[in-house]
Image (tube, rainbow, N blue to C red):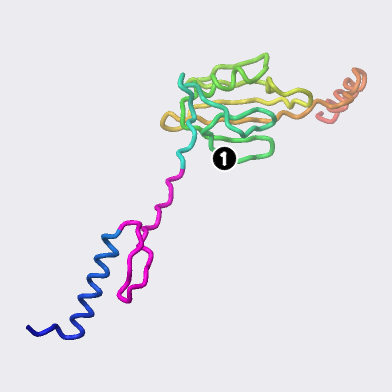
């Protein structure tokens, strides 16, 4: 029997070596020269990123995020929009009622106006947990498209540190009336 030509033997040896590497486990193997080689170890796949934390608790209520505006902690899932002067605009994926239930216990105010579509307006409110230096704000929750909500937080100007007395206020009012004529 004749032996296979030299290139065919080299191809056969290469095929056998590849088969050994492909079938091999984590043990070491030897190459054609008899030297020990390490077996092929497939690369580990990158881990999937962890899913984001839920926006709502087991009872369905919105959960707090780590973000706050003017000392008021925002719920998870709000997307920041424009900030225009003292107005902070947000959009959220849930119905206005959920946001009204979230913000209600976190604000101290004398006036809450219910609006159409389950929204609310908290007038001249301050965050309940803020101590000293609290900034008054209006928090407006309105329906958005397709069951979503819009949340607007408006920073109210601070009262003057030294308001004018009654006589000065009357004088300024009279001046304004004279100028209007």
Mark 1 secondary-structure assignment:
strand
Describe residue 22's horizontal placement relative to residue 38 as left or right: left
Q: Is residue 37 magenta?
A: yes
In-front residue for pair 82/76 = 76
Residue for badge 1 = 81
Q: Residues within 10 Å of mark 1 (few under 14, many from 20)?
A: few
Q: Residue at x 87, y 26 (%)?
A: 161
Residue range highlighted in magenta:
25-49
Q: Is residue 124 visible?
A: no
Rendered location of residue 94, percent (x, y): 46, 28
In-front residue for pair 80/173 = 80
Q: Main secondary structure of the magenta part?
A: loop
Rendered location of residue 169, percent (x, y): 88, 22
Task: Answer above or below: position of 151 versus 11.
Answer: above
Location of the N terminus (image quadrant) = bottom left
Task: Answer above or below: position of 79 versus 163.
Answer: below
Q: Is residue 24 magenta?
A: no
Rendered location of residue 84, percent (x, y): 65, 40
Q: Residue at x 56, y 20 (%)?
A: 120
Farthest-out residue, left = 1
Q: Image quarter for residue 164?
A: top right
Task: Answer above or below: position of 169 versus 67.
Answer: above
């Amino acid at each position: 029997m004749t032996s296979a030509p030299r290139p065919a033997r080299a191809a056969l040896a290469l095929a056998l070596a590849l088969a050994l590497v492909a079938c091999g486990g984590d043990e070491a193997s030897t190459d054609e020269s008899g030297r020990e080689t390490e077996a092929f170890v497939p690369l580990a796949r990158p881990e999937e990123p962890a899913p984001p934390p839920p926006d709502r608790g087991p009872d369905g209520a919105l959960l707090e995020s780590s973000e706050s505006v003017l000392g008021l902690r925002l719920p998870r899932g709000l997307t920041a929009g424009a900030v225009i002067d003292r107005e902070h605009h947000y959009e959220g994926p849930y119905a206005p009622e959920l946001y009204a239930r979230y913000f209600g216990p976190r604000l101290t105010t004398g006036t809450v106006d219910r609006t159409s579509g389950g929204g609310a307006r908290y007038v001249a409110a301050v965050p309940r947990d803020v101590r000293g230096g609290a900034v008054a704000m209006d928090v407006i929750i309105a329906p958005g498209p397709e069951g979503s909500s819009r949340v607007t937080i408006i920073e109210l100007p601070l009262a003057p540190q030294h308001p004018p007395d009654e006589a000065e206020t009357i004088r300024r009012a009279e001046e304004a009336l004279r100028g209007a004529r």
